[in-house]
Amino acid sequence: MQIPKPCPKCGEFQLNRSRSKNIFEKGLKRILPIKTYRCHACHWRGWVSNRKITQEVSLRKAVLIYSAVIVISLIVANMLRIMILR
């Protein structure tokens, strides 16, 4: 049984799960414990935590993951640049 969640915008308990609209949303959904929801009262659509964790932990995890992606991307770009210049 799911406990109803209030809408972050209007406070009504009319949130329903919303499908991921693109690859970015699908990727975030796999990495972080958040899901997309839509409010039928005010038509808000956004992310709501799916677990009982603090927002700070989610943000810290997201920052670490994105930092790792940036570092790996820079390493790969540098390796490609070196290969091209040879």
Image (tube, rainbow, N blue to C red):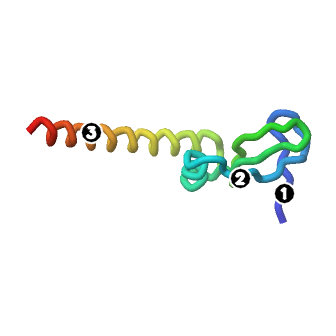
Give the CA distance from mark 1 to mark 2: 19 Å
* 70 sits to left or right of 60: left
Count of numbered circles in the view:
3
Contact between marks 1 and 2 (CB within 8 A): the answer is no
Counting from the top left corner in percent of width and height, residue 64 is at: 45, 42
Closer to the chain start, of discs 1 and 2, is 1
The disc placed on residue 3 is: 1
Label 3 crowd (10 A; few <14 / some 14-19 / many >=20): few
Point out the image quarter for the C terminus: top left
Counting from the top left corner in percent of width and height, residue 25 is at: 60, 47
The residue at which mark 2 appears reads as: 19
Name the residue: 80% across, 37% down: 44
Judge by depth and name the residue closer to the eye, 62 or 80.
80
The disc placed on residue 77 is: 3
Label 2 crowd (10 A; few <14 / some 14-19 / many >=20): few
Q: What element carries label 2?
A: loop
